[in-house]
Amino acid sequence: MSKTILITGASSGFGLLLANSLHQQGFNVIGTSRNPEKLQAAVPFTVLALDITDENSIKEFTNQLFVTINQLDVLVNNAGYMLTGLAEETSTEVGKLQFETNFWGTVNLTNALLPYFRKQKFGQIITVSSMMGLVSLPMKPIYAASKHALEGFFKSLRFEVSQFNIKVSMIQPMWAKTSLGANMISVNGDIIEYRQFKEQTNKYIKNSIAEGDEPALIVNKIIKVINAKNPKFRNIVGKMAGMVLFLNNHAYSMFEKAIHKSVKTAM
Ligand SMILES: NC(=O)c1ccc[n+]([C@@H]2O[C@H](COP(=O)([O-])OP(=O)(O)OC[C@H]3O[C@@H](n4cnc5c(N)ncnc54)[C@H](OP(=O)(O)O)[C@@H]3O)[C@@H](O)[C@H]2O)c1
């Protein structure tokens, strides 16, 4: 029997490509979106409505999901967005919204599905974190914090649910060419002293996304993790991922120097 895979945020980027690829490979795919009618009209896999920031939406979604399917093999927590802005210019209110989606939305959906996975005595939870769950960049303090928080949550969860044969993995992509940049929320503060640094950093990030990996690279990594017998917790992916993690772990001052230089020279 082919596996049933649930993918949040299946309307664009990694989620859409992953859902289409798995559907083509014969998996039973359920994708979610906050605008399900629009997405369902354009794709061959089943689409259900879900806003992960809304606990009622999660409740309704979960009830509907188990009317649609009998068992769930894999949850791919993919939905998320990127908040960009200096630490000093980002209000608590705006920062909390980032956590409502990237952290609490992901955590609440996972917790809503865990009773089903436990009852089945098997399941797999794969969460699309980011290389920014392991390292950080300027202008991304809250985005990086939300991804670091996910890493901590799921590391703990992996210990707790292995006894029920539930496997927990993270995917840490580098920059990739999706709609993440276009859907990004930007904080526009006006602290004059940062003006040049902000302009340079924005150029650096824009260039990094434009030169980023093809989304297929990340999607293939997720499919590898789905097919793995003993999936690892950490799954970094991207042309530069190995080097970045090496510098972060073993030569942090070199990593910092390289980022400062890239920001200063960005055109
Ligand atoms: N692209 C990169 O460079 C990169 C690198 C590392 C990590 N990531 C991570 O990869 C994941 C996917 O991003 P992407 O690059 O594919 O971006 P994307 O093209 O902007 O797709 C984001 C998806 O998230 C969904 N979403 C956003 N807020 C949601 C909410 N409140 N409830 C439910 N769904 C929501 C959107 O669905 P609807 O609008 O249809 O609801 C959309 O399908 C994110 O978690 C992102 O942080 C991306």
Image (cartoon, rainbow, N blue to C red):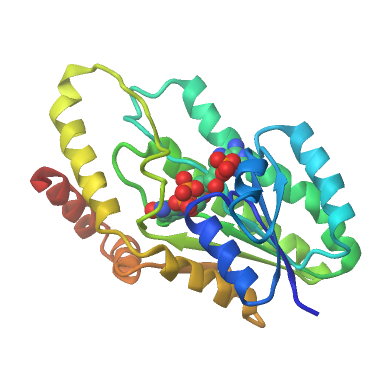
**Residue 65 at x, y = what percent?**
82, 52
For the view shown, which residue lies furthest in the bottom direction?
229
| Vertical comparison of 157 with 189: above or below | below
Snapshot quadrant of residue 168: bottom right
Snapshot quadrant of residue 197: top left
Residue drawn at x 75%, y 35% is 57
| Vertical comparison of 255 with 243: above or below | above
**Residue 83 at x, y = what percent?**
42, 35
Residue drawn at x 15%, y 51% is 262
Q: How many marks?
A: 0
Question: Residue 18 versus residue 228: which sits nearer the camera?
Answer: 18
Q: Describe residue 70's horizontal placement relative to residue 195 as left or right.
A: right
**Residue 240 at x, y = what percent?**
29, 67
| Vertical comparison of 116 with 227: above or below | above
Residue 103 visible here: no
**Residue 101 at x, y = what percent?**
58, 37
